[in-house]
Image (tube, helix red, strand yellow):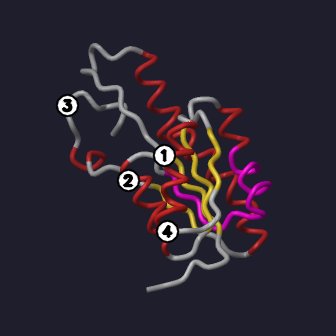
Amino acid sequence: MFSLEGKTALVTGASGGIGSAIAKALAAQGARLALSGSNGDKLRAFREQLQDEVGGDHVEITCDLSNATSVEELVPATIDTLGKIDILVNNAGITRDNLAMRMKDDEWDQVIRINLEAAFRLMRAAARPMMKARHGRIVSITSVVGATGNPGQMNYT
């Protein structure tokens, strides 16, 4: 395998299924994690479980990815807490399914704001310290539905 000892990672959607699996895999390789999500209680419980199962000194940072100000504060909060950011994993995402002719503007906007705009803002914020450190990795998780399509998910795909 490989080692992530001494590396830090921010994982969005960390308390969900895919996010928690990513976080566990990174922690198992030695990374120190900033676990982010919108539900503070769920994040705290996951952090405690992660520390019990894998070890490490991880932190949780609650963030509403639909709020641009909150998103803009997430990378700086990670750096303030962990000292740096080596890895950003854009994993959080939502769906608001509806047929195109019935889709409301807010259903479109919510998905675009969280799945696309928040990921862009986080990548932009993480790129600066990564470039300064001359090292960093950004991973954005997507869905196969983007390639295959699904009825009622034009905002998601």
Q: Secondary structure at mark 1?
A: loop
Where residue 133 appears, as percent x and y from the top left, is: 76, 73
Which percent across, then down, holds residue 83?
Answer: 78, 63
* Disc 2 element: helix
* Magenta span of residues: 74-90
Q: Quadrant of the C terminus?
A: top left
In whole angstroms, how far apart are the C-alphas of marks 3 and 4? Answer: 40 Å
Which of the marked residues, 1 or 4, is nearer the chain's N terminus?
1
Q: CA distance from mark 1 to mark 3?
A: 24 Å
| Spot occupied by residue 33 in the image (x, y as percentages of width and height) | 60, 61
The reply, left or right, for residue 127 in relation to residue 18 is: right
Residue in view at x 54 percent, y 44 percent: 43
- Residue highlighted by disc 1: 13
In terms of sequence position, does the residue under pointer 2 or pointer 1 come before the other? Answer: 1
Give the mark nearest the N terminus, 3 or 4: 4
The first of marks 2 and 4 along the sequence is 2
The residue identified by callout 3 is: 151
Q: Which amino acid, by three-letter code, is at mark 4?
A: Val
Q: Find disc 4 in the rendering and name its residue.
A: 54
Residues at marks 2 and 4, CA–CA distance in whole angstroms: 17 Å
Magenta stretch contains residue 60: no
Quadrant containing the N terminus in the rendered view: bottom left
Q: Which residue is mark 2?
A: 18
* Crowdedness near tag 4: few (<14), some (14–19) or many (≥20) residues, C-alpha within 10 Å: some
Amino acid type, residue under disc 1 in the picture: Gly
User: CB atoms at circles 2 and 1 under 8 Å apart?
Assistant: yes
Asked if marks 1 and 4 touch (Cβ < 8 Å), the reply is: no
Q: Amino acid at mark 3?
A: Pro
Mark 4: which secondary structure? loop
Q: Secondary structure at mark 3?
A: loop
Mark 3 and 2 residues: CB-CB less than 8 Å, in contact? no
